[in-house]
Amino acid sequence: MEQLAIEKRQWKNYFNSFNKRNHSRLVKLEVSDETGNHQTVKKMPLSGVSLDKSGVEIMLENRRFDEEHYTHIVQKPKNIIKDISFDGLNEILVIVDESGYTTRLSFDNLPELNV
């Protein structure tokens, strides 16, 4: 894996392109906090990642089931790191808050190609 830190001034643009590449892909969301590492969500479609005054918001939503949605907010983000596999096919998003805790968003599989 190759790690690439995203500059703060590029976060919004990065999230816009990240969302276009990965919208509706199945994700796994893992959070590290004062109590340890937790797998918060496994296999839920990505709706989007955005940046606003409250922090970085990760939205997951299964449109087939209206009640199935999840939002995770990383308050006071300090670093955004993109991990890329050597073949360039897998992208993992790591968000580090000012306390050093991490939120990790990874993908379960590659999107299906509609040919």
Image: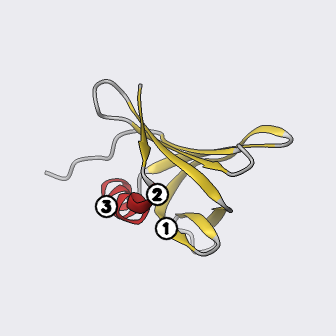
Q: Earlier in the sequence, mark 1 or mark 3?
A: 3
Q: CA gap, disc 2 to disc 3?
A: 19 Å
Using a 10 Å C-alpha cutoff, classify the residue at mark 1 as few (fewer than 14 neighbours), some (14 to 19) or many (20 or more).
some
Q: Residue at x 34, y 40 (%)?
A: 110
Residue named by callout 2: 8
Q: Earlier in the sequence, mark 1 or mark 2?
A: 2
Instruction: Classify residue 19 as left or right of residue 102.
Output: left
Q: Quadrant of residue 70?
A: bottom right
Dot 2: element:
helix
Instruction: Classify residue 18 as left or right of residue 115.
Output: right
Instruction: Classify residue 95 as left or right of residue 15.
Output: right
Q: What percent of the width, then of the height, locates residue 65?
A: 56, 69
Instruction: Classify residue 35 as left or right of residue 64.
Output: right
Q: Quadrant of residue 17?
A: bottom left
- Front disc: 2 or 3: 2
Please tell me which residue lies in front, 92 or 4.
4
Amino acid carrying mark 2 in the image: Lys
Amino acid carrying mark 3 in the image: Lys
- Reply above or below: 107 against 68: above
Q: Residue at x 65, y 63 (%)?
A: 73
- Cβ–Cβ below 8 Å for labels 1 and 2? no
Dot 1: element:
strand
Residue named by callout 3: 20
Amino acid carrying mark 1 in the image: Ser
Q: CA gap, disc 1 to disc 3?
A: 12 Å
